[in-house]
Amino acid sequence: LRSRKSTDNSLPAQKQANECEAWFTSRIPGYMPPGFRSFAITRAYRVKVKIQVELCGKSFSFEVEGPN
């Protein structure tokens, strides 16, 4: 965290993070229904993440999609 001095001495100094890291887990399907028969099955999964922050009436968003 970086500390930034406040112009008003009665207020505490503001702290701003340089980075943010989030981890999550999810279940990847391991079962294929018997009626679906194909030998061209790949286990490629895509992850799409959208982050949106609203601060002081302004909205900031970031969207990223993982590889196939």
Image (spheres, helix red, strand yellow):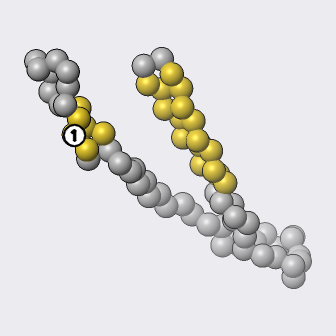
Residue 68 on image: x %, y %: 73, 66
Element on which disc 1 rests: strand
Q: Quadrant of residue 37?
A: bottom right
Q: Estimate the x, y position of residue 24 in percent, counting from the top left.
A: 47, 57
Residue 21: which quarter of the image?
A: bottom left
1 with respect to 62 (left or right): left
- Looking at the image, residue 29 lies above or below residue 51: below
Viewer-closest of 66 and 9: 9
Residue at x-position 16% and y-position 18%: 8
Q: Residue at x 63, y 50 (%)?
A: 64
Can you give x and y, in whole percent of width and height, for residue 65 in the image? 67, 54
Q: Is residue 59 above or below residue 47?
A: above
Q: How many marks?
A: 1
- Tag 1 residue: 3
13 to 28, vertically: above or below: above
Q: Amino acid at mark 1?
A: Ser
Specify the farthest residue to the bottom.
39
Left of 21 or right of it: where is 46?
right
Q: Residue at x 10, y 18 (%)?
A: 10
